[in-house]
Amino acid sequence: MDTRKKVAAGMAGFASMLWLGLTAAVAANQRRLVFNPTVEREVQNPRSSGHRTRPVVLRAADGTRLCGWLMTPKIPGRHPAVVYFGGRSEEVSWVVRDAGKLFPNMAVLAVNYRGYGESHGDPAEIHMVEDGCMLFDWMAARAHVDPHRIAVVGRSLGSGVAVQVAKERPVHSVVLITPYDSILAIAKRKFRVMPIEYMLRHRFESIKYAPALKAPTYVLRAASDDVVPHSHTDQLVAKLVQLCGDDTVPDSDHMNIPYLEGTQSRIAAFLGSQFAKPLAEAAAAGSPASGAAPASASSAAPIPAPAIASVAIDGAPAALLPSPAGAIPAPAIASALDTAAPIALPLIDAVPALAALAAPLSPNGLPLASK
């Protein structure tokens, strides 16, 4: 073998080793590349100007402690509700601060993912979806919530959670902020030479579940988005059978879009108009608001409600009994959460810091970062 052939063989061997090394590194660190848990609160002592605000602690099916906030309108009676799912780097205390503008006259539940904020555990797609279904069921069991009018709102990574929860539960309406077709598709776009489809466990394949959504769906895009290219949103939108709107928020990017007045007013207007419709009209439009779970020939068996969930409000726990499969669990003990009378809350200790916004990752990292 002459010298040139030896050099070529050596370079090919080096390239192969490098490729294998990079592939192994991505496979081993994919949880850190897909998720970026933010522990510090974005808002130190979150309060909603338009709601009564209460910290809540819920237990997932496996006992993992999930922490967040419940906001209820100050006017007594049953209200429509929203369950919010945040982005990859998002701690959700800011939702409490802005709930008065985002979700006026609606009950709101914003809970941090596992490993985010004060929630315990480690994030994973399967846990996010299971926990999301549990949050929906828990919200539907509140006495002050109309169980037939519960919407899900998901931002960026959370749009994938919202889509899967909407497939599994009788969601009234859906709002998706900077959504994507799938995390797998975005990863394959950035890592063209790697066998990503064989490595990535947390795929968030919204495009796979989108045709099963029967609830009215509203999509909001950022004017400038270097995290979720519009082409990936286009793929998802094409599969949504109940698309009610697809708007681009002026002067927005992937990071600032949820905080802008243009975004918040659009979400409030869409949800307000949907909740104002009679249930019969919503059902005729394809929404499962009448209580029937959305059907899908391609979907797997519905994710069951957790066997036992618990909530601690102001330090007082209230147990929720198990419910039959497919049924919305009802509380065994009426808690102070369901009463119209205001409840005085103690001050919440928090680290006085702003949640770090994740910058786009370097070429060595998966560019799924961001909220």
Image: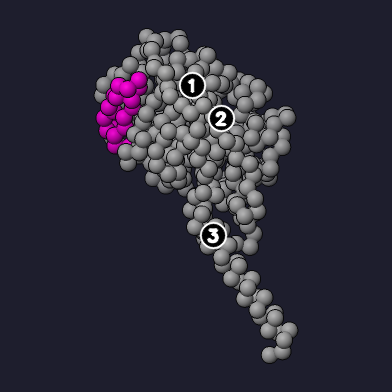
Amino acid, disc 1: Asn
User: Are the residues tagged 2 and 3 within 8 Å (C-beta)?
Assistant: no
Mark 3 or mark 1, earlier in chain: 3
- Left or right side of 341 for 176: right
Secondary structure of the residue carrying numbered label 2: loop
CA distance separating discs 3 and 1: 39 Å
298 relative to 345, above or below: below
Amino acid, disc 3: Ala
272 relative to 218, above or below: above
Residue 37 seen in this snapshot: yes
Tell me the residue at 55%/33% (across/down). 355
Mark 2 or mark 3, earlier in chain: 3
Q: How packed is label 3: few (under 14 Cα within 10 Å), some, or many (20 or more)? A: few
Tell me the residue at 55%/49% (across/down). 33
- The residue pinned by badge 2 equals 354
- The residue pinned by badge 3 equals 25
User: Are the residues tagged 3 and 1 within 8 Å (C-beta)?
Assistant: no
- Left or right side of 366 for 57: left
Q: How packed is label 1: few (under 14 Cα within 10 Å), some, or many (20 or more)? A: some
